[in-house]
Image (spheres, rainbow, N blue to C red):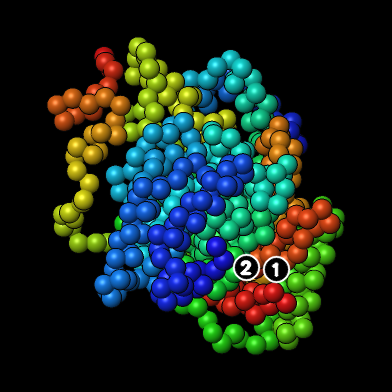
Amino acid sequence: MDGMTVISRDDVQHLAQLSSLQLTDEELGSLQTDIGNILGYIEQLGELDTTGVEPTYQVTGLENVWRDDTVIHSDVTREQMLALSTESANHQVKVPKVL
Amino acid sequence: MSRISNIIDQIKSGELTARAAVEAALEKAKSTDEFHALLSVTEARALERADEIDARIKNGESVGRLAGVPFITKDNFLAFGAPTTAASRMLEKFDAPLQATAVEKLEQEGAICIGKANLDAFAHGGSTENSAFGPTKNAFDQTKVAGGSSGGSAVVTALDVVPFALGTDTGGSIRQPASFNGVVGVKPTYGTVSRYGVVAMASSTDTIGCFTKDIADSELIMDIMSGRDMNDMTTLPDFFAPITDLKPGQKIGIIKESMGNAVDPEVRNAVNDYIEKLRADGHTVEEVHLPMLKYALAMYYIIVPAEVSSNLARYDGIRYGHRAENVATLAELYGRTRDEGFVTENKRRIMIGSYVLSSGYFDAYYQQAQKARTLLVNAYEELFASYDVLLSPTAPTPAFGLGENTADPVQMYLADIMTVPPSLAGLPAISVPAGVSGSGLPIGVQLVGPRRSEANLLALAKSVEGK
């Protein structure tokens, strides 16, 4: 299976859309090759028999961690946070027109 | 710059001031500029802090355990004094409004951050060649890679710019560059050090650790950074304390699958020499099997991209970070911002993540990988029922050439084959220098233990250090 996974240019375009990436034509071509090769490599996992095996999503056995529902003071001000944005006005982040 | 303890002693005795220590580190940073290990220096803030510490010492006030000791963070830790870029265009101008818990804890002990080290953009890579600002060069040979993703941190430690540097390790990003640059690299048990204020990559395996010249310095830094943080709910109650009385006659397994023909003979020789040192001290070293090793990279390159695609969804150009210009629609703003802000490897991982999480592929890839991960965790548990420590090379080869693996992402991923398995299982793992190749490149050996056993790994490595 090595490197043989066929992934079309349309598939790559669809993945880019799902990932909110507006790729150039050149990038689409090279990512098509790379992604095909990577998928070819990871497909070897299909060989493993995992019948009846529970998945491991996290490794330290933590369960829900709670804290008191109290307001925690932060040193970071609203002005500082807004200053991180490219554009803001009237204490709000400015974005292009949506509709 | 030597060891942390020397600097502390000299500052306490008045032989050295914090300002002089910081100035020396800044000077060294400038004179080693050609390695491109640093993305920025935080000179003004560092000197200001040094003067404060000197004033406290002069006034007889108490100072912390690292008073006046300069250090460098990987540039994915939020830290004051210069932008936190994650070596990306996306965060090129991002001035952090707060500092990472790890950085805060070190500063509370008087340590002084003098700069920010290069990395693969968003820590995606194993050579630091994926930095948006150009690669870092190996400390021993400028035609070779630094390793990665914490390449800059490893190189500044190896070049003695600072006595310690911080890194992050998701699948080998501290251990592999430590191996390539002949320094100690510590990746603790998952959950040991708070990740608050560190740019997230893959949340189920991201850890924070350090680079030092010797084991004692790593023990000190890990002791300071470890512990529970209510800002990172995955952190464990503090369990780390350096061990002074090493358990004698430990049972150590050398993983057979990590010593095969695909591994450079010089690397195998260095590991065998290390084994002999352990045996000479009365420890037992036996060959053990970990057949799951061959599947670990495939698991990793499903699970990690899945988590990456989710964690990097936040970079949308709205609240912070790069925003594309001259866009007509919101969709175009997202798409162009992300295309411009991410390097190719970021895009590859995000898209692979989108793929393995898509309906129709979720069970075959993501779910299968998480089940396989259980088999890997079980395989380690079985081994640790009989063994205290597992050994392997840290990487299959010494540092490879700049540009050698950039054309083939799968080839690049293979450099992580030894370091990825303990990450998936959340185990502590350290890389310690074990020799030098014929062409003068460092070789590291990796020690892995059961969860929460990093103090034993460090103590064991310390007992044969320099022998």
Amino acid type at circle 2 is Val
Give SS at disc 1: strand
Q: Mark 1 lies on which chain?
A: B
Quadrant (top left, top right, bottom left, bottom right) of the C terminus of chain B: bottom right
- Residue at the spot 28% in from the left edge and 75% down from the top edge: B60
Left or right: B447 as drawn, with respect to A1: left
Question: Looking at the picture, which amino acid does disc 1 mark?
Answer: Leu
Q: Please name the residue shown 53% across and 46% down the image.
A: B30
Task: Examine the rendered structure and indicate whether residue B120 appears above or below residue B212.
Answer: above
Residue A98's x, y, as percent?
Answer: 28, 17
Residue B65 lies, in percent from the top left, at: 39, 72
Residue B238 shows up from this direction: no
Q: Where is residue B68 in the image (x, y as percent from the top left)?
A: 40, 64
Residue at image mark 1: B391
Same chain check for tags 2 and 1: yes
SS at badge 2: strand
Q: In which quarter of the image is the N terminus of chain B?
A: bottom right
Question: Taking B18 as reference, is B358 left or right?
Answer: right
For residue B98, say whether it is visible. Answer: yes
Which residue in the protein does label 2 denote? B448
Residue at figure coordinates x 36%, y 59% from the top left:
B50
B54 and B415: which one is in front?
B54
Q: Is residue B309 above or below residue A62?
A: above
Asked if the residue at tag 1 contacts the one at tag 2, i.e. Cβ–Cβ closer than 8 Å, the answer is: yes
As drawn, is B76 to the left or to the right of B320? right
Label 2, label 1: how far apart the Cα atoms are: 6 Å
Chain for disc number 2? B
